[in-house]
């Protein structure tokens, strides 16, 4: 998550492979199982990570901002993968998009927010699909 502990450390990157948590292999484990291992851990947590091999390109991307056209409350969203990671916003709020790496869930923060941590918001494509499902449908006569 952009702005989270792993992101701020600069030691874990998109594409890296997590192999072990505190000496326990997690190669064939589901994310829920890894979360359980992390929740049971006390004190320092050690990760064994295989870094991705990719050429780093300079980030020439400009900042992207969007204006919310609807209210969004992650604690009421049954589709969000992690409600605690969601970012609530109101119609008219200006959000800075931090990552569009996922087609369904973007990472964003409120414009001008000093907190560097991003939260999940529904992507434009995901929200448009949802809106189409909610439209009343009538058959032509």
Image: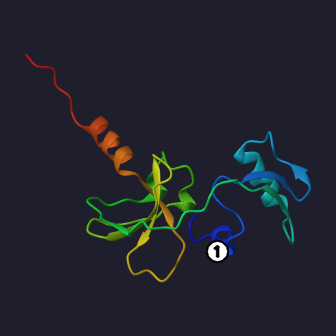
Determine whether the residue tagged by mark 1 lies in a helix, strand or loop.
Answer: helix
Q: Is residue 89 left or right of residue 25?
A: left
- Position in image of residue 99 (x %, y %): 48, 60
Instruction: Where is residue 92? Give x, y as percent.
Output: 26, 68
Q: Nearer the viewer, residue 46 or 63?
A: 63
The percent coordinates of residue 23 (x first, y second) are: 92, 56
Residue drawn at 78 percent across, 59 percent down: 39
Q: Is 23 located above or below residue 95 in the figure?
A: above
Taking the spot 45% from the left edge, 46% from the top edge, the residue there is: 103
Nearer to the camera, 19 or 83: 19
**Horizontal relation, residue 13 to residue 75: left or right:** right
Q: Give residue 64's position: percent from left, percent from top.
A: 36, 66
User: Quarter of the image holding residue 49?
Assistant: bottom right
Q: Tell me which colouring the rendered structure shows.
A: rainbow
Front-lying residue, 46 or 74: 46
Q: Is residue 85 above or below residue 131?
A: below
* Extreme-right residue of the structure: 23
Residue 69 placement: quadrant: bottom left
Q: Quadrant of the N terminus?
A: bottom right
Look at mark 1 in the image and give the residue it sits on. 8
Disc 1 crowd rating (10 Å Cα; few below 14, some 14-19, many 20+) is few
Q: Residue at x 37, y 66 (%)?
A: 89
Q: Residue at x 21, y 33 (%)?
A: 136
> From this viewpoint, which residue is outermost toward the left?
141
**Between 20 and 132, which is closer to the camera in this rendering?**
20
Q: How many marks?
A: 1
- Judged from this view, the residue extending furthest toward the bottom is 114
For this view, does 102 lie left or right of residue 70? right
Q: Quadrant of the C terminus?
A: top left
């Amino acid at each position: 998550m952009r702005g989270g502990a792993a992101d701020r450390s600069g030691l874990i990157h998109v594409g890296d492979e997590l192999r072990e948590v505190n000496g326990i292999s997690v190669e064939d484990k589901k994310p829920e199982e890894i979360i359980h291992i992390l929740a049971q851990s006390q004190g320092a947590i050690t990760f064994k990570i295989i870094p991705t091999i990719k050429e780093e390109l300079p980030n020439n991307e400009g900042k992207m901002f969007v204006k919310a056209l609807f209210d969004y409350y992650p604690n009421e969203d049954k589709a969000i993968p992690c409600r605690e990671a969601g970012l609530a916003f109101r119609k008219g709020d200006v959000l800075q998009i931090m990552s569009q790496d996922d087609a369904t869930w973007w990472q964003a923060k409120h414009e001008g927010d000093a907190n560097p941590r991003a939260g999940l918001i529904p992507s434009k494509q995901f929200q448009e699909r949802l809106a189409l499902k909610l439209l009343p449908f009538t058959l032509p006569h």
